[in-house]
C-alpha cells in the first residue's frame, strides 16, 4: 500500500474530529467565557504533558512490532510487557496529580472564584490518565502492523468523542467540572474501543512482565523517553508560563489559536505516522519514501498555512468572535508560520528515530529546551501573548534546521 494511500487513511482518522472541533471549540469558547475556556485548555495541556509517563514505550512498541511482525509469540510478549508498564505509570501519574493538586492551582495563578472548580477537574482528569496511556500502546500495536484502516476508524470515533463529549456535558450545566467529566467519559470509551479493535492480537492469558522485553523497549524507548519529557515542556510550557505570568483568564486568547494549530497538525502527523514503521523496516527504498513524504507535506501543509495566515483575522472572528479577533489574530498568524516549519520537520524527525537514533532527536530537544524557556520568559515580558507566539515559532524553525542537518549526516 502506497505512502499516499496510508497517509490519507491515517489523515481520515483525524479529519472528522478536526472538522468537528472547529464549531465545538468555538461554542465552548463562547459558552464558557475566557476564564473557564482558558482553564479547560490548560486541563488538555496537562493531559498532554502526562505523555511523559509514556517513557517512550509506545514508540518502541511500533518499532518492535514492525520488526517482529511475523513472530506472534514475541508480539504478545511485547504487548503484555508494555501494558503492565503503562498501567503502573498511568496510576502513578494520576496519584502525583492528586497529591500536588493545590500546588498546580497556585502555580497556574487560577482566579480564586474558579479555583475549586479547577481543583475538582484536576482530580477527574487524573483518573483518565491510565486510560490515555494504555490507548497509546494499543494504537502502537496497530501502527506496527500497518493496520492504518482500523486505526483510522478508531481515531475517527475516539477523537470525535473527545471533542464532542465536553460540549455535550456543557449543555447540562456550564462548568469546567462538567466539561472534564465529558473528557473522562470519552477516554474510558476509547480504551474499550481500542481493545475491541485489537482483539485478534490479544489472548486471554494473564498479563505478564517480561524483563528482557522491557529492557529492549527501554533501550530504544529510553532516549524517546527523554524526548517525551522534554517535548511536552517545549509544547505546553508556553501555556503554563503564560498562565503563571499573566493569569489563567488570559490563557484562552493564546490557547484557542494554539489548539487550531494542533488540529491542523493532522496533515504532517498522518504522513509521519505512515512512514515510521516503513522506515524502521529494511525492505523499503528509504530515500524515495522520504522524498514522497516531503512532497505530500509541501503540497498540503504549506499552502494551507499560508492561506490561514492571510485570512487570519476573518477566520478567528468567524470561529471565536470579535473579542478573540482583537487579541488573538496576530498570535494565530505567527503560530501558523510555526506550523509550516513544524510540519516539514516531521519527516527528518521520523527518519532519525526510525534509524534507531532516538538519542539524536532527544539531545536536540535537550539543547533547545533551556534557551527556549529563557526566550519565552524574555518575550512574554516584552510582548505578552504575541511574545509567546514568537518564541514558539522561533524554536520550531531552529528545530527544523537541526533535524534536517542531523538526518542528512546520521
Image: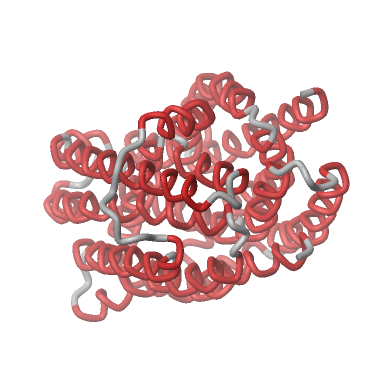
Q: Quadrant of the N terminus?
A: bottom right
Left of 33 or right of it: where is 336? right
Left of 141 or right of it: where is 85? left
Q: How is the image coloured?
A: secondary structure
The answer to which image quadrant residue 274 occupies is bottom right
Q: Report the residue at 88% width, 48% height from top.
A: 288
Q: Position of residue 210 (x, y in %)?
A: 36, 36
Q: Report the residue at 72% width, 38% height from top.
A: 351
Q: Position of residue 46 (x, y in %)?
A: 34, 45
Front residue of 112 and 339:
339
Q: Position of residue 98 (x, y in %)?
A: 15, 42
Any part of residue 327 in sight: no
The answer to which image quadrant residue 167 occupies is bottom left
Q: Report the residue at 79% width, 46% height from top.
A: 283
Marker count (numbered) = 0
| Image vertical order of residue 116 relative to residue 194, above or below | above
Q: Position of residue 187 (x, y in %)?
A: 32, 63
Front residue of 78 and 152:
78
Left of 65 or right of it: where is 108? left
Front residue of 115 and 86:
86
Any part of residue 393 in sight: yes
Front residue of 206 and 120:
206
The answer to which image quadrant residue 38 occupies is bottom left
| Image vertical order of residue 213 relative to residue 283, above or below | above
Q: Report the residue at 18% width, 33% height from top.
A: 103
Q: Quadrant of the C terminus?
A: top right
Amino acid at each position: 500500500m502506497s505512502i499516499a494511500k496510508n497517509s490519507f487513511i491515517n489523515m481520515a482518522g483525524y479529519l472528522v474530529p478536526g472538522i468537528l472541533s472547529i464549531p465545538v471549540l468555538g461554542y465552548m469558547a463562547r459558552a464558557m467565557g475566557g476564564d473557564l475556556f482558558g482553564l479547560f485548555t490548560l486541563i488538555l495541556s496537562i493531559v498532554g504533558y502526562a505523555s511523559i509517563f509514556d517513557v517512550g514505550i509506545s514508540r518502541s512498541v511500533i518499532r518492535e512490532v514492525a520488526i517482529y511482525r511475523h513472530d506472534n509469540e514475541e508480539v504478545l510478549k511485547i504487548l503484555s510487557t508494555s501494558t503492565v508498564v503503562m498501567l503502573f505509570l498511568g496510576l502513578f501519574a494520576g496519584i502525583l496529580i492528586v497529591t500536588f493538586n493545590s500546588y498546580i492551582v497556585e502555580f497556574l495563578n487560577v482566579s480564586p472564584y474558579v479555583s475549586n472548580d479547577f481543583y475538582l477537574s484536576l482530580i477527574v482528569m487524573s483518573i483518565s490518565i491510565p486510560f490515555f496511556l494504555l490507548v497509546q500502546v494499543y494504537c502502537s500495536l496497530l501502527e506496527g502492523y500497518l493496520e492504518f484502516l482500523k486505526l483510522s476508524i478508531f481515531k475517527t470515533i475516539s477523537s470525535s468523542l473527545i471533542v464532542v463529549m465536553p460540549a455535550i456535558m456543557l449543555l447540562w450545566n456550564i462548568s469546567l467540572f462538567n466539561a472534564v467529566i465529558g473528557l473522562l467519559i470519552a477516554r474510558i470509551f476509547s480504551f474499550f474501543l481500542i481493545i475491541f479493535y485489537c482483539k485478534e492480537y490479544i489472548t486471554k492469558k494473564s498479563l505478564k512482565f517480561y524483563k528482557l522485553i522491557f529492557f529492549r523497549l527501554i533501550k530504544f524507548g529510553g532516549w524517546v523517553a527523554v524526548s517525551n519529557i522534554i517535548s511536552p515542556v517545549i509544547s505546553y510550557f508556553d501555556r503554563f508560563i503564560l498562565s503563571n505570568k499573566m493569569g489563567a483568564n488570559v490563557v484562552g486568547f493564546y490557547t484557542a489559536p494554539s489548539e487550531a494549530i494542533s488540529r491542523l497538525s493532522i496533515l504532517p502527523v498522518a504522513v509521519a505516522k505512515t512512514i515510521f514503521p516503513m522506515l524502521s523496516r529494511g525492505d523499503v527504498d528509504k530515500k524515495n519514501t522520504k522524498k514522497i513524504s516531503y512532497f505530500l507535506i509541501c503540497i498540503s501543509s504549506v499552502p494551507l498555512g499560508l492561506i490561514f495566515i492571510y485570512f487570519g483575522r476573518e477566520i478567528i472572528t468567524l470561529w471565536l468572535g470579535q473579542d478573540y479577533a482583537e487579541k488573538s489574530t496576530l498570535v494565530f498568524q505567527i503560530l501558523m508560520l510555526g506550523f509550516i516549519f513544524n510540519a516539514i520537520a516531521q519527516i527528518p524527525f521520523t527518519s532519525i528515530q526510525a534509524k534507531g537514533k532516538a538519542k539524536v532527536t532527544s539531545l536536540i530537544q535537550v539543547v533547545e529546551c533551556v534557551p527556549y524557556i529563557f526566550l519565552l520568559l524574555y518575550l512574554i515580558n516584552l510582548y505578552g501573548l504575541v511574545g509567546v507566539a514568537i518564541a514558539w515559532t522561533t524554536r520550531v524553525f531552529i528545530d527544523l534546521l537541526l533535524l534536517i542537518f542531523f538526518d542528512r549526516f546520521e
